[in-house]
Image (spheres, rainbow, N blue to C red):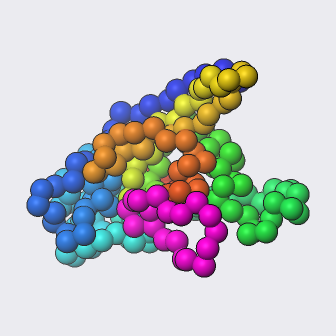
């Protein structure tokens, strides 16, 4: 496979100081950066007053911005691929980690077509081993790029699939798709393409 890179120009708005909402404004920052609107307009698109964005709130806000012709197209269905897996690998069901390669291809296809991804993630990485803890997401990010590159190793090289994440707090950064899935729970994704 050849190395490649796709990067779209828009980024999440920076977190306002002071916060508008007590625990942060990531949903409004992602929506604002995507649609080129202010934090407050983003909030008012989804709510009567500023408050945190649920997954359904974000989907409804994207649909409203599409109606207002700020977004060209919106895809609200999160993908799930059921593929033949060896039974030994299904102890915890179809995990996000097992679906990461297909998810990456889906996101690459969307980015190639000018769509951005909107994901909820766990802001701080979660434990790397199964436990009885329920993991949940708590932060919105914008997916604005992807790349494939070869990384040298002692006895050759290995391919790495990465996405470019735009975060209201951390800025833009690259992360391996498997790390994004395993440590941050970043699999539920909404897709939207700006109108212009």
Residue shown at 64% from the left, 59% from the top: 96
Residue shown at 62% from the left, 64% from the top: 129
Q: Position of residue 120 (x, y in %)?
A: 44, 61
Q: Find residue 181 and report its image quarter.
A: bottom right
Magenta run includes residue 189: no
Q: Position of residue 52 (x, y in %)?
A: 30, 71
Q: Is residue 68 left or right of residue 159?
A: left
Residue toward you, 111 or 193: 111
* Residue 77 at least partly seen: yes
Q: Find residue 10 and report its image quarter.
A: top left
Residue shown at 71% from the left, 55% from the top: 98
Position of residue 111 relative to residue 134, above or below, is above
Residue shown at 81% from the left, 60% from the top: 89
Q: Is residue 176 left or right of residue 195?
A: right
Quick one: quadrant of the C terminus?
Answer: top left
Residue toward you, 40 or 74: 40
Magenta segment main secondary structure: loop
Q: Is residue 40 left or right of residue 128?
A: left
Q: Which residues are magenta?
A: 122-139
Residue toward you, 115 or 166: 166
């Amino acid at each position: 496979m050849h190395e490649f890179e796709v990067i779209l120009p828009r980024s999440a708005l920076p977190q306002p100081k002071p916060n508008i909402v007590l625990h942060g404004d990531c949903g409004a920052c992602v929506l604002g950066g995507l649609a080129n609107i202010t934090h407050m307009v983003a909030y008012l698109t989804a709510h009567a007053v500023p408050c945190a964005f649920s997954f359904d709130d974000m989907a409804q806000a994207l649909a409203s911005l599409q109606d207002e012709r700020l977004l060209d197209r919106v895809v609200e269905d999160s993908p799930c691929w059921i593929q033949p897996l060896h039974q030994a690998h299904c102890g915890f069901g179809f995990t996000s980690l097992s679906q990461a390669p297909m998810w990456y291809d889906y996101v690459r296809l969307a980015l190639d077509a000018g769509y951005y991804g909107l994901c909820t993630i766990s802001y701080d990485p979660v434990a790397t081993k199964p436990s009885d803890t329920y993991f949940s997401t708590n932060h919105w990010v914008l997916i604005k790029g992807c790349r494939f590159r070869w990384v040298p190793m002692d006895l050759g090289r290995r391919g790495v699939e990465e996405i470019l994440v735009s975060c209201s707090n951390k800025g833009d950064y690259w992360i391996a798709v498997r790390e994004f899935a395993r440590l941050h729970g970043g699999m539920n994704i909404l897709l939207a393409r700006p109108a212009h």
